[in-house]
Image: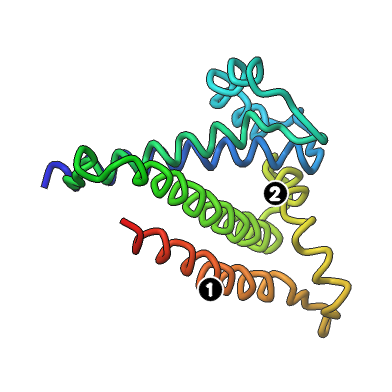
Amino acid sequence: MISGALAFLLQTLGNLFVIAVLLRFMMQLFRVPFRNPFAEFIVVITDFAVKPLRRLVPGLFGLDWACILLALLVETAVVVAIYWLNGYPFALAGSAVWSVMLGLGVVRLLSLTVYLIIGLTLVRAVLSWVNANTPLVPVVYALSEPFLQPLRRIIPMISNVDLTPLVLFILCQLVLMVPILAMERALLAAL
């Protein structure tokens, strides 16, 4: 019972931190202005881990590899900790288990990224209906637009209704159901 609660707490806190790091990476990737209360919040809560890692992992091709590495390390650590809390016999498993744990970390990071895209699109849709004057709007619009814009070229508006968020939801769910789930099952079978 305690191990289940600890696993839940660890996964929740770890995933929230990974989401913050992924948001920071995406804000840099999509050139979102950082002079915004929400963007400043993301930078402040991730600076303690990203800045030291940047000394070891330089940016390349305009990408902040320190953020990606940090997100992967944290997600892998969460996976390992949850398996350890559930009593997985790491001592008996051998050295191949660590590559499987790293693979599960990658799969969970991809899954979390897809869920982040779904969440950003959902927040964008709700903000467009409710209040477009919050400090969150420029960040959410800038982060979701690169995923919605290609779909807008294909899917026309119907009676001034933009169906691209719905199509993006469906595509994201398909990505979660087919390739990501298949990768996770293959890795779990290797345990």
Residue 98 screen position, x and y as percent: 38, 41
Q: Residue at x 34, y 40 (%)?
A: 95
- Per the image, the residue denoted by label 2 is 140
Please name whichever residue, 78 or 19, is drawn nearer the observer in this view of the structure: 78
Amino acid type for the residue under numbered disc 2: Val
Looking at the image, residue 188 lies above or below residue 134: below
- In the picture as drawn, the residue positioned furthest to the bottom comes out as 159
Where residue 186 sits, quadrant-wise, is: bottom left
- Which residue is found at the position 75% from the left and 27% from the top? 59
Name the spot of residue 148 as percent of width and height, x first: 77, 64
Measured along the vertical axis of the image, is residue 34 above or below residue 48? Answer: below
* Circles 1 and 2 in contact, beta carbons < 8 Å: no
Residue 118, compared with residue 86, is above or below; it is below
Could you tell me if residue 35 is visible in this image? yes
Q: Which mark is residue 178?
A: 1
- Looking at the rendered structure, the kind of residue marked 1 is Val
Q: Residue at x 78, y 31 (%)?
A: 60
Q: Does the image show residue 11?
A: no
- Local secondary structure at mark 2: helix
